[in-house]
Amino acid sequence: MSFILFLSVILTGCKIELYSGLAETEANDMLSILLAEGIAAEKQPGKEQTVAIKVPESQVAESISLLKAKGYPKEKFASIKEIFPQEGLISSPTEEKARLVYALSQGLAETLTQIDGVVTARVHVVLPKAKQRKTESVTPSSVAVFIKHHADVDLSSYIPQIKLLVNNSIEGLDYDKISVVLFPTAQQETSSIKAKMTSALGVSLAKNSQGVFWGWLSGLLLLLLLSNVGWWLKLKKGNNNQQAKAS
C-alpha cells in the first residue's frame, strides 16, 4: 500500500502553475470546479496574499478550457481611483466625459457579473453631446448591455431587473433606451474530462499518463528486484565465509 502511495506522490508531483496572482475567493471557486471534474488541482500561496493554482502537466489544456467555459479567471474591472487619478491636472471636458462613460460601463459590468450564471458582461453607454446651438436637438442617452451566460441558466426573466438596474444607475436615462442581449455559452461536455481519467492499482491518473505510471512502476520493481538479489548474494557470501571459518 505504501508503495502505491509513493507512486501516487511521484505522479501527482509533476504539476505546473496554471494561474497566479488570484484572490483567495476566486482561487477557491476555480479549485472547486477543477476538482469536481476529476482534475488533481491544488492551491499554492503566492506573493502579497495572492494564490496560485497548480495542475498536472498532462491536464493543463483541459483545465484552461474548463475554467474558460465557467468564466474564470474573472475579468478585472477598473476602479474609480484608477479612472480618475488624483494627478492635479485639469482634463478637458471631452476627456472627463470619456472617463465618466468608462467608469459607468465598468461599474455596471462588474455588478452584472455578480448575477449567478453570468460568465461575462459588457455595458456600452452613450451619453448625449452638448448642444452647439440652442435650436439643435439633443440625442438622448442610451445603453446596450451584452451578457454571456452559462447555457444551462435562463436569464431572460431577469431582463426587466437588469434594465431597471441600469436605468437607476445613469441619470436622465430612459428605460426604453436600454437594450439587453443575452448569449449562452457553447455547450461543453465537461464529462469528457472525467472520461479521460483512468485508474491503475487504485491510483487515479490521466489516460495519457498511463505510460509514465507503468514506466515508473517497472523501474521501481526492477530496482527492488536488483536490491533483493544484491542482499541475497551478500547474505549468501556471508554464510559461506562463516562455514569456511567453522571448518
Image (cartoon, grey):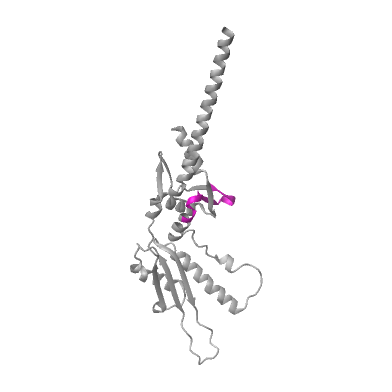
| Closest to the observer, 40 or 223 | 223
In the image as oriented, which residue stretches furthest toward the top?
247
Q: Position of residue 193 (x, y in %)?
A: 41, 53
Q: Tell me the quarter of the image containing the C terminus.
A: top right
Location of residue 176 with respect to 41 vertically, above or below: below
Locate residue 159 relative to residue 10 in the image: left or right. left
| Residue at (54% x, 73% y) in the render | 100
Residue at position x 46%, y 41% from top? 214
Placement of 66 over or under 169, stated as above or below: above
Above-or-below relation of 231 to 47: above
Q: Point out residue 236 in the picture as x, y percentages from the top left corner.
A: 53, 18
Q: Where is residue 132 in the image (x, y as percent from the top left)?
A: 55, 89
Residue drawn at x 57%, y 12% as measured from the top left: 242
Q: Nearer the viewer, residue 208 or 190?
A: 208
Instruction: Indicate whether 166 appears above or below 46.
Output: below
Specify the farthest residue to the right: 88
Give the camera-side residue of 115 and 240: 240
How many numbered circles does the render carry?
0
For the record, the magenta segment spans 44-61
Quarter of the view holding residue 85:
bottom right
Is 60 magenta? The answer is yes
Q: Residue at x 43, y 71 (%)?
A: 146
State the image coordinates of residue 112 (x, y, percent, origin top left).
Answer: 43, 65
Q: Quadrant of the N terminus?
A: top left
